[in-house]
Amino acid sequence: MNKRHRFTAQILEKISERILFISSTVTSLAVLLIIIFMFREGLGLFNHTPVEEGSILAINRANPVKELTAEQVKKIFDQEITNWKEVGGIDSTIELFRIDDIFNFYTEEQVGSEFENLGQLLSEHINAHSNILAFFPAHFKIKNFLGKELPVEKISFGKFFLGKEWFPTAHPAAQFGILSLILGTLWISIGAILIALPFGLATAIYMSEIADERVRNFLKPVIELLAGIPSVVYGFFGLVVIVPAIQQIFNLPVGETALAGSIILGVMALPTIITISEDALRTTPRTLKEASLALGANQWQTIYKVTVPYASSGITAAAILGIARAMGETMAVLMVTGNAAVIPTSFLQPVRTIPATIAAELGEAPQDGMHYKALFALGCILFFITLIINFAVQYISSRKKHG
Amino acid sequence: MKSPAEYIQLKKRNQAIAKTTFTAMSLIVVVFLFFLLGFIFIRGIGVISWEFLTSMPEEGMTSGGIYPAIIGTFCLIAGSILFAFPIGVLSGIYLNEYARESFGKRFIKTMTNNLAGIPSIVFGLFGMSLFVNTLGFGDSILAGSLTLGLLTLPVIIKTTEEALKSVDDSFRRASYALGATHQQTVRKVVLPIALPNIITGLILSIGRVSGETAPILFTVAAYFLPKLPSSIFDQVMALPYHLYVISTSGTNIKESRAIAYGTALVLIIIVLLTNLLANALRGYFGNKVKMN
């Protein structure tokens, strides 16, 4: 080989190594981009008023009320709160005024064909009614407005996480409280793991300790297939088989319940739990098992006194990853849980999870609106939960290796 | 205090109970899977015909076929594999053959693991924000394929790494001993041996991609499109999304049930085929390597 040839070869080798390196950075880059984009959209939700964009709430100047919360606004417009006293004002009935109501007080002529006098009339009307709460588009607020704009409390982290009401399209002030969604997600995932862990662990123990080679060679592809079935097919199966079954067995008005979600998610979490805990069980050194058998323990005693304790960190990892899988699952849950945003109290009622909320509502949320941002904020939460779980699992398994 | 004989009996009885329980529970898992497959197979097989697979949906998707959804799903599979396979295999090679144990390598591995753990709906949100809106691809095959590709990337990297790891070091040493460079060794010795396992991983990831719904909800999937895509900037229908809409949100849920069973069966058949193919490959090449 001559010198120049070797030189080009070396250059080529360097270049190809660069290309390989660049390819390997794509995943890290992707995670970084996901963080940036999720946050850019999601954090926009906070420190904004939840009142519909381009609209304002206004009251009479004499009214002592300084600020309302989104929840209060909703209750007022739903007529659940009818007195200013309940929101910190004086004892008088709240007089609701929407923009269309202007024609109850003024003729079309007075308002003008191009609504040119509307701003002036609104201002006068609000000035004349001391108990009024008016809701109208912001561009009708004239320069020397005689009323007082009433701010609605901005969305804070606390309100977002602990708020119980999720009415993202409520009019005039949307409610972004995700407590019920978080609890719904946890509720279903815990149910799923309660179903999946016993079955998964039993199957893993059976496969690694009891079954012979032939049975194992049959079970492995079966588990792989179980993992391969699309979530939407699980959801469909749940919809046509499990949901009606639950409805009949428990005699419910609807079968779309947390229980249906937990069962389907449990099945979907099985492959994760089985493969990881089986791997963990298999790492138990043969010498340990043989020592146990030599001491007179039989196979079952060896399993639960030696093999399972030895594999316990792997089994923990399997359970945690199973929960993570269940929490992030979207389609199957969306199809079988009924999606009612209420705080769960039983397994026989509809619940709504974070992923299902995103999937169901993002299509209808106008881009860059509050609702859109709220859904991205939900995505951030989901992202963080799974990220933390992943780090926890990697920590658990790395500790095992070193220990 | 129990006598030794009683104790031994108890021990035996416990073991018998435990073994029966574990066997029974494993059996339940298997029976559930076969029930699910059987149920959809029996309800769906009557629906599937050449006509069903190659004609357009009709009458509000209550009759006709699922041709555009099949084509759409194939476009998405092809697009995402085209994107994820080269990058995935290359980074698998880098991680196993080139990277030295260092912070950088651990970081990349951790990030790959994390990417694998992110829920698919978050990929959907991300894909919508980056590809559809920021880069301006719109709801398109391109945006959907890239989103799905990112989702499968960690799987492909991991299978490539595993495949390379299973190549015995003696092959590498023999190659070096003959005077081959590092790159020659990787290209001419390690890769050919690992290739069957890499391809197996690729086939399995095709099965995975074909069924993903959440990532395509907001990046490409169309509720109903009477025409086939003509460019990568077109929207398409896709099998999993089609199954979702006709079984939940359509106006004629009852009437389109038969189509839903048919669509579910087609999805399951795709997964079954990819799994069978992967297993067959594994068996075939597994034997071949042993013989050599």
Image (cartoon, helix red, strand yellow):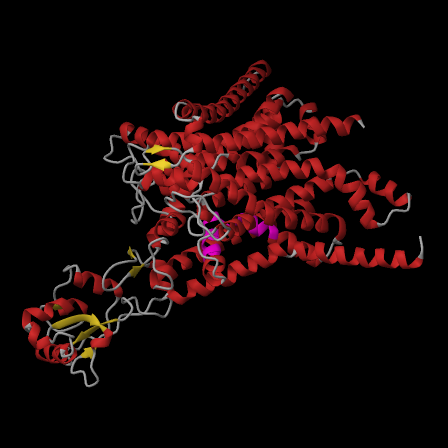
Does residue A145 appear in the picture of this structure? yes
Q: Residue B261 or A60: which is nearer the viewer?
A: B261
Give above or below for B54 relative to A45: above
Residue sticking out furthest to the bottom: A144
* Image coords of residue A273 (percent x, y): 53, 37
Instruction: Say left or right for A332 vs A256.
Output: right
* Image coords of residue A37 (percent x, y): 49, 62
Instruction: Say left or right for B33 vs A55.
Output: right
Residue that appears at 38% across and 24% down: B43
Residue that appears at 43% across and 40% down: B68
Does residue B239 appear in the picture of this structure? no
Q: Residue A25 or A90: which is nearer the viewer?
A: A25
Instruction: Say left or right for A218 vs B100.
Output: left
Instruction: Say left or right for A308 vs A163.
Output: right
Give above or below for A93 relative to B162: below
Q: Residue A304 or A273: which is nearer the viewer?
A: A273
* Image coords of residue A340 (percent x, y): 29, 46
Task: Please report the bounds of the magenta region as a residue range.
Answer: B112-128
Asked where in the image residue A194 lies, by quadrant, the reply is top left
Asked where in the image residue B49 lies, by quadrant, the reply is top left
Give above or below for A118 relative to B165: below
